[in-house]
Amino acid sequence: MEIEKRLAKHLKRLNRAIRKIVAQAPEFAELRKMLREEQVELAIYVVPLIGGNPSGEAMRFELTDEDRSFLRQAGIRFE
């Protein structure tokens, strides 16, 4: 159980770092600017999927509350 807590902590930090890098990337800024100028709505998902399961159980990928918050802030709608 301890390894799962440590792994979750590190993956959460990695997730934040990846989103921050993408949000600050000049390429992403250029894309947002172009979309704004052309008044185009586009859903862009930046959701790193990293997982493993030493116990052999089936892996599940779910959006966390933090993921949902990030997507909402980016103007991305989801169901």
Image (cartoon, rainbow, N blue to C red):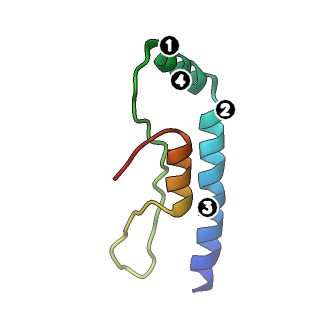
State the separation of the CA atoms marked 1 and 2. 19 Å
Q: Are marks 4 and 2 in contact (CB under 8 Å)?
A: no
Up/down of 76 relative to 32, above or below: below
Q: Which residue is mark 2?
A: 24
- Looking at the image, is mark 1 or mark 4 nearer the viewer? 1
Measured as percent of width and height from the top left, residue 11 is found at 59, 62
**Distance from label 4 to label 2 (Cα)?**
11 Å
What residue is rendered at 57% in x and 58% in y? 66
User: At 35% from the left edge and 79% from the top edge, which residue is drawn?
Assistant: 57
4 or 2: tag closer to the N-terminus = 2
Residue lying farthest to the bottom in this orientation: 1
Question: Mark 1 or mark 3: which is in front?
Answer: 1
Dot 1 falls on a residue whose secondary structure is helix
Measured along the vertical axis of the image, is residue 17 above or below residue 9? above
Q: Residues within 10 Å of mark 4 (few under 14, many from 20)?
A: some
Which of 5 and 69 lies nearest the eye of the viewer? 69
Residue wearing tag 4: 32
Q: Earlier in the sequence, mark 1 or mark 4?
A: 4
Q: Which residue is mark 3?
A: 12
Q: Earlier in the sequence, mark 3 or mark 2?
A: 3
Please name the amino acid that badge 4 sits on.
Arg
Q: CA distance from mark 1 to mark 3?
A: 34 Å
Q: Are marks 3 and 4 in contact (CB under 8 Å)?
A: no
**Quadrant in the picture for the N terminus:** bottom right
Q: CA distance from mark 3 to mark 2?
A: 19 Å
Tag 3 secondary structure: helix
Residue type at the position of mark 2: Gln
Q: Which residue is mark 1?
A: 37
Please tell me whether mark 4 sits on a helix, a strand or a loop. Answer: helix
Mark before the other along the chain sequence, 1 or 3:
3
Query: Mark 4 against mark 2, which lies toward the viewer?
Result: 4
